Structure formats: structure tokens, C-alpha cells
Amino acid sequence: MDNEIMRTENSSEEIYTSIRSFVITAQNKVYAAVNSAMVIAYWEIGEQIYKACGENDRAEYGKNLLKYLSDRLTAEFGKGYTERNLRAMRQFYSCFPNRHTLCAELSWSHYRILMKITDKIVRDFYTEECAKSSWSVRQLERQINTMYYQRLLASKDKSSVAAEIQTSTPKPEYEKAIKDPYIMEFLQIKPDIHVYESEYDHSKDADRKSNHST
């Protein structure tokens, strides 16, 4: 009887593990598709605003245009289109003017952090490394804050420096798309307020910390 119960439990666990993998794979596919569409849309919005405002979006015409666009877009598509966010989209285009260089592996949250790096060479390095190494948003944030680029250049044991991140800030097994505040805003889905506030606050902290470190 005990052996039969054990076999039943093992079988149930195997079925659960298999079904769980299906769910995670499906979620990752949905997240990748939505994220790619969102990043491209924000790049295109940024391009339109940049070309309309020129080099200075804070001149009179630029400020009026951003306010007009923000009011209209927010009324129709929700709060993801504040003037601040529209400026971020414009900056996105300015930092990454070649659409073909955008990395499908990187989320809008990744790009929000990368845009804070003013040195193009350093920014391009982190962009490439982030995509190549599949860093999470938190891992990218930590690498920038701990001056990974400079440490890697100075180190003779580059492989050890590169491997540190997996110990100091392990990447989660999978990142839940439903907890990404930017995805939620883009899809106009009302999130669980407690989950949303936690992730949103972290995204804002990441923006501020990256800004101080560059």
C-alpha cells in the first residue's frame, strides 16, 4: 500500500511539473511577443516626438506638443503616456536611433535603465552584455551600480568577474510578465495593487540608482 501511495504521489508530481513547464513556456512566449511590440511602439513614438521637437523638447512648441499628446493618449490608452514617459520614449529613440539594433531579449524596463548611461560606449557595452548574458532587470541594475564595465576592464580574471552576478544576484527561474508594471500599463490591465506597487516602486528605484551611478 505504501509503495502504491508513493507511486501515485510521484506520478502526480511528474504531471504537475510537466504542466507547470507548459504554463511557464506559454507565459514566456506571451511576454516576449508583448514586450517586443511595446518596445518597438515606444521607439516609434519616440522617433515621431524627436523629429517633431528637434533637439529640444522643452522649448515652447515641444512642451505644448508633449502636453497635448499626453492628454489625448492618456484619455484613450491610460496612464502610461504621461509627459515624463513620452520624454523617456523620445530619449529612447535618441539613445538607440537605429531600430535594427534593438534587442528582442531586452524589456522596456531594461532600456529604461540603459538610457540613464550617458556614455555611448559604456551603454552599448551593457546593452550587448545584457542581451548576451540574459540578465534580469535586477542583474543589469546591479552590474551598473557595481561598475561591472570598469571592473571587467581592470581585471585579469575576466571570467570570474563575469560569473559573480550569478552568485550575488541569482536570476529567477522565470520572470512573471504579469508583474511588469510597464506591460500592465501598455495592455491597460488593472493589476493587483499590492503586486503592482511593489514592482513599480522597484522600477522607479532602478531608474534613480542608475541615474546616480552614471
Image (spheres, rainbow, N blue to C red):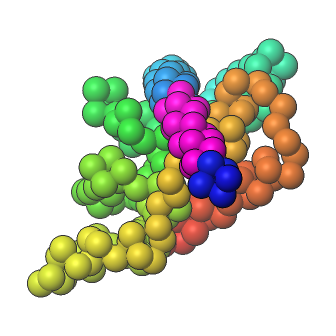
Up-down: is 83 above or below 109?
above
Q: Nearer the viewer, residue 129 or 77?
A: 129
The percent coordinates of residue 155 (x first, y second) are 18, 83
Q: Which residue sits at x=52%, y=37%?
A: 18
Q: Residue 23: say if magenta.
A: yes
Q: Residue 195: say if magenta.
A: no
Image position of 5 (left or right of 167):
right
The percent coordinates of residue 59 (x first, y second) are 62, 36
Q: Main secondary structure of the magenta part?
A: helix
Image position of 6 (left or right of 73):
left
Q: Which residue sits at x=87%, y=46%?
A: 193
Query: Which image quadrant for residue 93?
Result: top left
The percent coordinates of residue 122 (x first, y second) are 29, 60
Q: Can you see residue 99?
A: yes
Q: Which residue sits at x=52%, y=48%?
A: 174
Give the quadrant of the C terminus.
bottom left
Q: Which residues are magenta?
A: 7-26
Q: Nearer the viewer, residue 193 or 212?
A: 193
Image position of 84 (left or right of 48):
right
